[in-house]
Amino acid sequence: MTRSLDALRTRVLAIGALALAGCASMAPHYERPAAPVADTFSEAGPVAGKSAAATDWHDFFTDARLRRLIEVALANNRDLRVAMLDVETARAQLGLQRSAEFPSLSLAAGEDRVSGQPTVFSAGISVASWELDLWGRVRSLTAAAAAQLAATEEGRKAAQISLVASVANADVAVRADGAQLELARRTLATREDTLKLTQLRFDHGVASDLDLQDARSLVEGARVAQASARRQLLIDQDALVLLLGQSQPADLPAGTPWDDFDLPDVPAGLPSDVLLGRPDVRQAEHQLVAANANIGAARAAFFPTITLTGSYGTASSQLDKLFDHRAFTFAPQIVLPIFDAGRNRANLAASEANRDIAVAQYEKAIQSAFRDVADALAGRATLSDQLRAQQAQADAQQHRYELTSLRFEHGVASSLELLDAQRSLFTVQQATVATRMALQQNRIALYRALGGGWTEPHAHTADARR
């Protein structure tokens, strides 16, 4: 019996050594595809300064109200929660696949009864169908699962970056809506005063009916603008609440006044920074690595599969003497594919096609990232100048309105001139608020496009999620 055990051990060790010596992966050598984009951004400007990806969102968004809103969203947003659970699922899948690399041991006890034969009792440890991974099929599948886990983790980071930027955009929109609503209220009050004065002049025969109707039209136009601004404010507040995953906290700190709200700028850097800083690009590359590993598993399917099944324990026809007799079984099996109606070839072709698809998706992710940055840089190059020009125009229109109002009170200017000055001033002021909003959202877009907004979840955030 001892010699039999020694022989069994020798066989297992020999086959295990053969497996370890020969289980090289048959996956193609992975090479990162060249980035199909230009070497520089056309509106990059200076590259000095801390990159967006290295700038914590706490440092970029310094407004106390906005910081609090982002913290609430990170703790409660359901899309981000799903992304985190996807990571846990992928981690479990990797553990499941990795377990296939090792034999599965089980403890079993049984009783075998056959008519006319003595009953046989048995107990021992068994190994069920452990595949010797000589061609790297199992290891390739494990590598694919590991790459898929890495891709899912990058997807979680991309989800957080998107959430942080979305909350910031929504908050900027709400602030701009508030500024537009306040502007409409002030304009309505001013136009109502003008209507009263025009009505008085009309009653004394100084103003015409045309002047009176123009004044009334401007008043109603201001009411339309006020209702529109209020509606847009409510809509944007609802969008912000959805991102937060709950209603806005009652203890929100006061935000920076709209006219003083200004987000910092970030250096564009080089296209290589985009590749290193954007999780969605890294996610696409990990998916490409997984597809590449699957080719190795498909190739290995063309070669023989060797599995081991065995057990070691005791057996006896008498239960009280069960542990007096040793017993073992050892059953290696070799399966060589001869005819499978083209299944293995089709599987390999599908794996190679999936790899080519992953290459195209990786290249598209790079191109999309490059365009995001280029578009944001184009906005940065023009919106600041546009806002300065519009602010100067608004100041000029304000001065024009004040002069026209003074001339109107002294009977020098007509009511038509006053109403035209009011109309022009309101239009320019609305455009100024809209441009300021576009400028701030453009800076958020550039920060996001360059990979900014990811940080490891803080302890209090994780507790809130649980």
Image: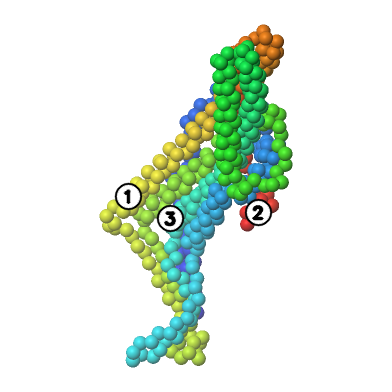
Where is the C terminus found, in terms of image quarters?
A: bottom right
**Label 3 is placed on what type of residue?**
Arg
Q: Secondary structure at mark 1?
A: helix
**Between discs 1 and 3, the one toward the N terminus:** 3
Q: Tag 1: Cα neighbours inside 10 Å, few (<14), some, or many (≥20)?
A: few
Query: At 69% from the left edge and 13% from the top edge, which residue is drawn?
Result: 409
CB of mark 2 within 8 Å of CB of mark 3? Answer: no
Query: At 54% from the left edge and 48% from the top edge, which residue is drawn?
Result: 79
Along the line of sight, the residue nearer the viewer: 158 or 225: 225
Q: Report the side of 27 relative to 78 (left or right).
A: left
**Between discs 2 and 1, the one toward the N terminus:** 1
The answer for how far apart the CA atoms under marks 2 and 1 are is 48 Å
The answer for how far apart the CA atoms under marks 1 and 3 are is 17 Å
Q: Which mark is residue 137?
A: 3
State the residue position of label 2: 464
Q: Tag 3: Cα neighbours inside 10 Å, few (<14), some, or many (≥20)?
A: many
Q: Report the side of 241 relative to 8 (left or right).
A: right
Q: Tag 2: Cα neighbours inside 10 Å, few (<14), some, or many (≥20)?
A: few
Q: Report the side of 231 relative to 116 (left or right).
A: right
Looking at the image, residue 450 lies above or below residue 112:
above
Can residue 393 be seen in this snapshot?
no
Looking at the image, residue 284 lies above or below residue 104:
above
